Amino acid sequence: MEIDQKNNGVSAATTATQPLWLLAEITYQCPLQCAFCYNPTDFDKHTQNELDTESWIKVLRQARDLGAAQLGISGGEPLLRKDIEEIVIEASSLGYYSNLITSGAGMNEKRIDALKDGGLDHIQLSMHDITEEINNFITNTKTFKLKQKVAAMIKDRGYPMVLNVVMHRYNIDHIQEILEMAEGLGADYIELANTQYYGWSLVNRDQLMPKKEQVENALKVTNKFRERPGNKMKIFFVVPDYFEDRPKKCMNGWGEVFMIVTANGDVLPCHSARVIPNLEFPNVNDSPLKGAWYDSPAFNKFRGDDWMQEPCRSCSEKENDLGGCRCQALLLTGNAEGADPVCSKSPDRHIIDQAIKDSQNPGVEAKPIIFRTNANSKKIDKGDEKDRLAKFHATP
Amino acid sequence: MSIEAKDIYKIAAHHRFQWEKAQDCYVILFPEGMVKLNGSAGEVLNLVNGESTVESITELLSKKFTDAPNIAKDIEGMIELALDKSWIEKVN
């Protein structure tokens, strides 16, 4: 992702922020049950109060007025909604560069044509592996052939093809074959997104996290593939922050350029912000987006660096990462205002080191993966998985 | 690649060039990306339309910005950069 320097690398306190990216998490329903889904584990309770078409159109107009130009239509699986075509037409007429982020489930010839006619700019398809076995295992569904079919449809309609592959212990060693598959399908872009641990992926962290050597090897293979003469495919390798010693600049800064509107209308600066206690997020049913972005206490809470504690406050590198991820700090240390524990300067770095250790010894604590289903969402919300979640300071 | 006077360029496939009112500048949009263009870069790309030659773009902008002595070189540099970033592609 590239963003102009004006909003990148500058403390929010001195930046006139604008939401340039709007992510519409239009439904939390999904036929896939991916073990690494970043959606909140309590998604089930937001499946009954989804915004209607009219409300989404209002959201698109308001965000466009504020400056949003990139639109991601995401979920859950957005194609489960019947009104995606209508929403795409509106997005196109407003001048958004629109992106449908899909598993492929619910796509067919008729819909892909209607979306093209409506002005959809690109489609990002999730892929899981070169093997049917791993694809079906990690998504807990038989979706391998479907994805191959949808990839061909995307290419056939002349969309730029963006494949997104979430990397974890089960597929990371297949990276060369995955890249070859993507190239064979005619992908223009591929994102190799190492799992970040929020939502369901945090619940399943010990089962998903690869070894450090696997990550290093994957990066090596990727770089070699990228540097081959004649390579046309753009390859993004999203580094897994646990194996780094500095945190990521999460969402490019809290309330800096990203705005997320969830299925039920909550307005968030990042996908998992609702895990932070005592923060009340605005909802589009009660407040216009302009007030939510500029004036709400939640969006202003972690803007800039006034909120920082030590060691971040006096750190010479604070502008580079703005202290990392607030949700990660809260979930792992209990303090949303502390340093992201990924940072080697954080007094809590041992938590990350322990997680790495735990994940490398699968024999120590063999627990089954908890797949992303409505039933499991209800169970977690009821407190049925307390043992497994005890080490976290909030339900992810 | 060297830029010739008779070259014609257009905005690359899968990219969109447009004016953004809220940002008060031209931008290039593409999958997963958005680049805000500064004033002069925006002026140049605004004339990259799949029809005008580099020569005619230079002529137009020289008339518009009479106080910019090295404008031909600046335009060439901008087109080189845009090509390098794959924002534009050669037509002829």
Image (cartoon, coloured by chain):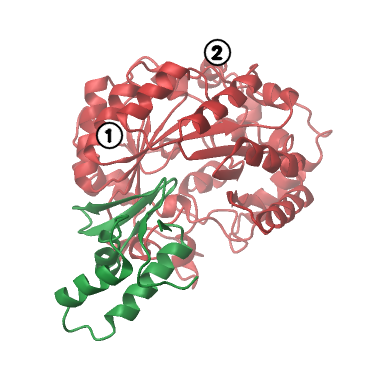
Chain colours: A red, B green
Q: Decide: few, some or many residues near mark 1? Use Cα within 10 Å; few <14, some 14-19, many ≥20.
A: many
What element does badge 1 sit on? helix
**Label 2 sits on residue:** A375
Q: Is residue B64 left or right of residue A359?
A: left
Q: Decide: few, some or many residues near mark 2? Use Cα within 10 Å; few <14, some 14-19, many ≥20.
A: few
Kind of residue at disc 1: Ala
Q: Can residue A392 be seen by looking at this rendering? A: no
Please state the horizontal and vertical placement of residue A89, each as a whole percent of the image.
Answer: 27, 28
Quadrant in which residue A358 is drawn: top right
**Label 1 sits on residue:** A91
What element does badge 2 sit on? helix
* Up-down relation of residue B74 to residue B47 (above or below): below
Kind of residue at disc 2: Ala
* Up-down relation of residue A72 to residue B38 (above or below): above
Identify the residue at image location x=42%, y=40%.
A273
Please state the horizontal and vertical placement of residue A275, each as a whole percent of the image.
Answer: 45, 36
